[in-house]
Amino acid sequence: MSNIIATIFVFLQRILPKSLITAAVYRIARIQSCVIKDFLIRNFVRLYKVDLDEVKLSVPDDFASFNAFFIRELAEGSRQVASAHDAIVSPVDGTVSAAGRIENDSLVQAKGIHYSLADFLAIETHIAKDFSGGEFATIYLAPYNYHRVHAPLAGRLQSMHYVPGKLFSVNAATVARLPGLFLQNERLVCHIDTSSGPAILVFVGAMNVGSISTPWTDEIRPKKSGIVESIDLAASPLSRSFKKGDPLGWFNMGSTVVLLFPPGKSEGLKDLSHGQLVSVGQQIGAVISAQ
């Protein structure tokens, strides 16, 4: 995408009714008419060159809607989860858009652009300080990527809260040109307890992301405004414990995941390269065992 086109694209996002567009996409993606959903699926596969060999079900016949295809499961054996006990694995298929060390209360959005960790997580500053000096990785899911999110480590979901916000695109052009993007978009913050300490995984919503789903919640639909909402995990009968590589949720359409560790608990994430492709289960770092 050229600089001029990218600048126009970002400008249009500022003025277009993003929530209305997302609501329309939400409805279209759930149409169950075979003629319409098969047309959408076949053309999407052709446009994005989706590898059908790794899809669990038959395409398009076994999918009730385009959204059902978008959140498709993979065929058994399509992804291998790194078996090393200390391995931190990628929670998604995608592209590393940023990675590094958390400096004080600051995360890198793109070259020359930073944002506040406390504001991003919508938590008290003194709690965010526990992650100062730690590592983070931001991974972008393009439309063609597999869109389920998996556990980077074995652990237990401690808490979860939803932060309402806008729905800007999170593609590379917008990330590089819109300061504070991740502070503006909606997000679902997951606090995880692991054997090596706490970790945080954040689902970041975006334009055309009709909703975010997890095994412990109903479908979470976008809200333009409101207060930060704590999710009542006790309302779910499902265990909150999971193994490395187990599913944590999925995006109904594409977006971004941010993974964070406190200081002295991980290594390797900061060494990930901008533009690096990663896949579910691939080792992207390692936990540092307590001495």
Image (cartoon, helix red, strand yellow):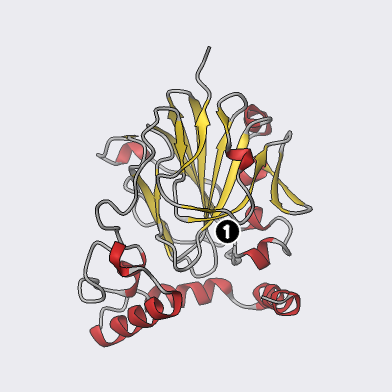
Helix, strand or loop at label 1? It is loop
Name the residue rendered at 63%, 78% in the picture: 16
Q: Amino acid at mark 1?
A: Ser
Residue holding disc 1: 225
Which of 186/115 is in front?
A: 115
Residue 17 position, x and y percent, is 59, 76
Q: How many marks?
A: 1
Which of 283/207 is in front?
A: 283
Q: Which residue appears farthest toward the top when viewing the image?
A: 291
Name the residue rendered at 63%, 39% in the picture: 270
Residue 94 position, x and y percent, is 50, 57
Question: Considering only vertical position in the picture, is 103 above or below 282?
Answer: above
**In this rendering, position of residue 155 left or right of residue 10:** left
In which quadrant will I find the N terminus?
bottom right
Name the residue rendered at 33%, 85% in the picture: 39
User: Can residue 122 be seen in this snapshot?
Assistant: no
Which of 13/5 is in front?
A: 5
Displayed quadrant of residue 146 = bottom left
**In this rendering, position of residue 72 left or right of residue 26:** left
Residue 203 position, x and y percent, is 50, 51
Q: Residues within 10 Å of mark 1 (few under 14, many from 20)?
A: few
User: Can residue 217 be seen in this snapshot?
Assistant: yes
Residue 273 position, x and y percent, is 63, 49
